[in-house]
Image: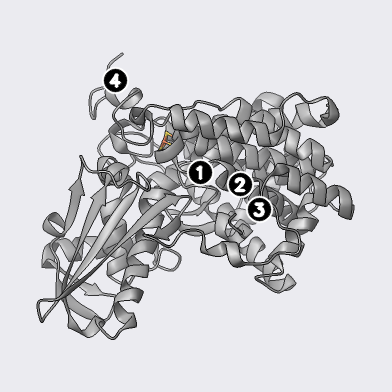
Amino acid sequence: MERISVFDIFKIGIGPSSSHTMGPWRAAQRFLREVGRDGAFDHVASVQVDLYGSLAKTGAGHGTDLAVILGLNGDDPVTIPVEQVQPTLEHIRQTKTLNLAGQKIIPFDPEQDVIFLYHEILPYHANGLTFRAFFRNGAGFSQTYYSVGGGFVEKEGEHNLSASVTLPFPVDNGADLARWCREEGKSIDEIVFQNERTWRFPEDIRRGLIDIWAVMQQCVYKGCHTDGVLPGGLDVSRRAKALNIKLLSGQPYENLETWQELIRQGNWSFQLILKWVSCFALAVNEENAAFGRVVTASTNGAAGVIPAVMMYYACFCPEFTGDDGIIKFMLTAGEIGSLFKKGATISAAMGGCQAEIGVSSAMAVGALTACLGGTAAQVMMASEIAMEHHLGMTCDPIGGLVQIPCIERNTMGAIKAITAAQIALESDPTKAKVSLDAVIKTMKETAEDMNHKYKETADGGLAVQVTLGLVEC
Ligand code: SF4
């Protein structure tokens, strides 16, 4: 079974998709490292990329071609300034060259050298891609990777390398997690923190999580202060900024801190809190759709659910305990996400949107329940409830863009999480009829039974009812 760190689940990057943007970007970087390993880098004359299955079908809308090009160009999704993305791509298109690994200029025509194989799918996973390097002496090197969801990448033939890591409290499923909590008398986040120490020093864990939270907050803030139309041709207008202005009725603030303080101090009705949570989620996913900087959580398409629920916790819950609460939230959410990855999937190309919004909602609710004082059993009950009511949710993005239904769907995932937390906190988990493991298994079987049209192919559902530029009622 995989050993997954919370830092594998929460990753800073660029939108719009973890499996179709972040994963392929990382695969390109990995390919370059492998080409360079035997000193072959100097001999590379040109490179090409083949995109298979879902990466081909929705790759254009999800920016897969752009991600592999930037990866080959030596850019990193964590550090590249987002305002540099489009100019860099434009330069590559115009000059028909790229700066391979940032080290040498080679000819590269995006139109010719990124090949969309719409009708081919590799057997291991729907998100396959093959990189080919051609050397000056006529030889070559190729390697296939799979973007298996949430930005995770596996090389052909090398699966589950993390299984060799030894953790103090190994967790393969919800039952393991519950047992460790019971036997050790610890909360979920305390168990996870001990496991995280296998990879990092305690201070690095805390600082790393707070840094990720800072990126999430910046993303929410930026989304709440940016308007206009999203790229891609669907003509979707951004809504978070107008909602933020309406909710604050012109009250002044200067920056993220004073904006948050203003929200915290407001005397908001239930209806207005619902609007705020929606506003936070819309803001993140509008940023995501606009190739902005987001945190994969557990995917990019669903990147708004967890920040929206964290903002709800930080702004509207008297139980909020500052950095300690944020760390507890993220450790708990990360562990729930890893349970779904191990037991089912967090890839929409394998499981539809239940694997994205459903998993993010289950992660958020577990964490919120823990932060509001729930027991480990209530945390798992809450996550089960959230997933139970996302089972079977299909992935059918219009135009292959991560916009409709994706952006609004994040608001739904966040609100369901908040509701499920309230149910779990008022329930006796010993009387629950469905365990977290049972719902994970159900999700996996539902994913296996789901028609491929609903697995991030844009071949079914809303994607075929509504075409670009023509909304049919
Ligand atoms: S429909 Fe759901 S799974 Fe599909 S791209 Fe949108 S958010 Fe992701």
Say which label, 3 or 2, has the lower sequence index. Answer: 3
Tell me which amino acid carries mark 3: Thr
Q: Nearer the viewer, residue 422 or 377?
A: 377
Quarter of the image for residue 82 reads bottom left
Quarter of the image for residue 34 reads bottom left
> Of discs 4 and 3, which sits in the foreground?
4
* Residue contact between numbered discs 1 and 3, judged by CB atoms under 8 Å: no
Q: CB of residue at label 1: within 8 Å of ligand 1?
A: no
Say which label, 1 or 3, has the lower sequence index. Answer: 3
Tell me which amino acid carries mark 1: Ile
* Residue 258 - label: 3
Q: From the image, which quarter does the C terminus lie in?
A: top left
Residue that badge 4 annotates = 465
Q: Nearer the viewer, residue 148 or 314?
A: 148
| 281 relative position to 62: left or right | right
Marks 2 and 1 sit apart, C-alpha to C-alpha, by: 8 Å
* Residue contact between numbered discs 2 and 1, judged by CB atoms under 8 Å: yes
Residue 431 spot, x, y in % from top left: 83, 24
Marks 2 and 4 sit apart, C-alpha to C-alpha, by: 32 Å
- Viewer can see residue 276: no
**Label 3 crowding class (10 Å Cα cut-off): few <14, some 14-19, many 20+?**
few
Residue that badge 1 annotates = 346
Tell me which amino acid carries mark 2: Gly
Residue that badge 2 annotates = 337
Residue 102 spot, x, y in % from top left: 29, 77
Q: Is residue 153 above or below residue 238?
A: below
| 191 relative position to 101: left or right | right
* Residue contact between numbered discs 2 and 4, judged by CB atoms under 8 Å: no
* Residue contact between numbered discs 1 and 4, judged by CB atoms under 8 Å: no
